[in-house]
Amino acid sequence: MASNEAFIAEIQQEAIATRKMLERIPAEAFDWKPYERSMSMKRLSVLVADMFG
């Protein structure tokens, strides 16, 4: 397997895991921040979702 094919396979696996994680975030938790100065869960979710865009 060429390195580009391995990379594509890895990205596809990560996309599956990311999609599962994003689907599990309830709307009530969008304003939650892991730390006071952190981004909100909504902002973090958008950031992760846009990585594959």
Image (cartoon, rainbow, N blue to C red):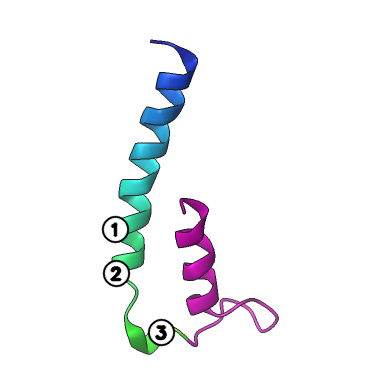
Query: Residue 31 in the image: x percent, y percent?
Result: 49, 88
Residue 29, placed above or below residue 52: below
Q: Which residue is mark 1?
A: 20
Is residue 40 rendered to the left or right of residue 12? Answer: right
Q: Counting residues from the N terminus, which is met first, the one under dot 2 or under dot 3? A: 2
Q: Nearer the viewer, residue 38 or 5?
A: 5
Rounded to the nearest angstrom, the CA distance separating label 1 from label 3 is 16 Å
Tell me what residue is drawn at x 36 percent, y 47 percent: 15
Number of the label disc, if any, that sits on residue 39: none
Tag count in the figure?
3
Q: Amino acid at mark 3?
A: Ala
Rounded to the nearest angstrom, the CA distance separating label 1 from label 2 is 6 Å
Q: Which residue is mark 3?
A: 29
The quadrant holding residue 9 is: top left
Residue 17, placed above or below residue 26: above
Q: How would you rate the neighbour count of disc 1 (Cα within 10 Å): few for under 14, some for 14-19, many for 20 or more?
A: few
Is residue 7 rendered to the left or right of residue 19? Answer: right
Tell me what residue is drawn at x 49 percent, y 69 percent: 46
Q: Nearer the viewer, residue 12 or 33?
A: 12
Q: Which residue is mark 2?
A: 24
Residue that lies at the very extreme toward the front in this rendered image: 53
- Whether residues under marks 1 and 3 lie with C-beta atoms below 8 angstroms apart, the answer is no
Query: Residue 8 in the image: x percent, y percent?
Result: 41, 29
Query: Residue 51 in the image: x percent, y percent?
Result: 52, 53
Q: Amino acid at mark 2?
A: Arg
Residue 33 is covered by the magenta coloring: yes
Query: Residue 4 in the image: x percent, y percent?
Result: 47, 20
Residue interval drawn in magenta: 31-53
Tell me what residue is drawn at x 54 percent, y 64 percent: 47
Q: How would you rate the neighbour count of disc 2 (Cα within 10 Å): few for under 14, some for 14-19, many for 20 or more?
A: few
Secondary structure beneath dot 2 equals loop
Secondary structure beneath dot 1 equals helix
